[in-house]
Image (cartoon, helix red, strand yellow):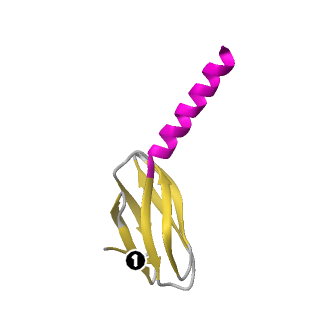
Amino acid sequence: MKLKTAFLSAAMLLVTTIASAFTIDYYNKDSQKHVFEVKSNGSTQKVEFSASTSGATSIQTSASEVEIKTSCGWVKVKNGAKVTIKDGCIKVE
């Protein structure tokens, strides 16, 4: 019975973690990858954007908006936003 309860708790934690993923679709025009600092819900983490490509990246947060620190300053990005990166700066589409 304890094993079943532990398994159920782990499954619920996994579902909660997946549901709280914050996704950003991006197109990085720069020939280098960028790793930016992200602030959400009072904590910070790093997010990586691959070089010269388009893709999607996820941030583990329950927030609907995050702030990303670039060489051009802080940019507010909403969940599901599409952004373009050029010269180390983020432009929200």
From this view, report whether residue 45 is shown above or below residue 42. below
The number of numbered badges drawn on the structure is: 1
Q: Is residue 70 visible?
A: no
Q: Is residue 35 left or right of residue 41?
A: right
Query: Measured from the top left, where is residue 84 in percent x and y?
Result: 40, 77
The amino acid type, in three-letter code, at marker 1 is: Thr
Q: Examine the rendering and report whether any part of residue 57 can be seen.
A: yes
Q: Decide: is 23 above or below 18.
A: below
Question: Helix, strand, or loop for circle 1?
Answer: strand
Residue 48: image quadrant is: bottom right
In the rendered image, the residue lying farthest to the top is 1
**Residue for point 45% across, 77% down:** 27
Q: In this orientation, which residue lies closer to the viewer: 66 or 81?
A: 81
| Depth order, front residue of 32/22 | 22
**Image coords of residue 2 (percent x, y):** 66, 15
- Which segment did they paint magenta? 1-21
Residue to which mark 1 is pinned: 84
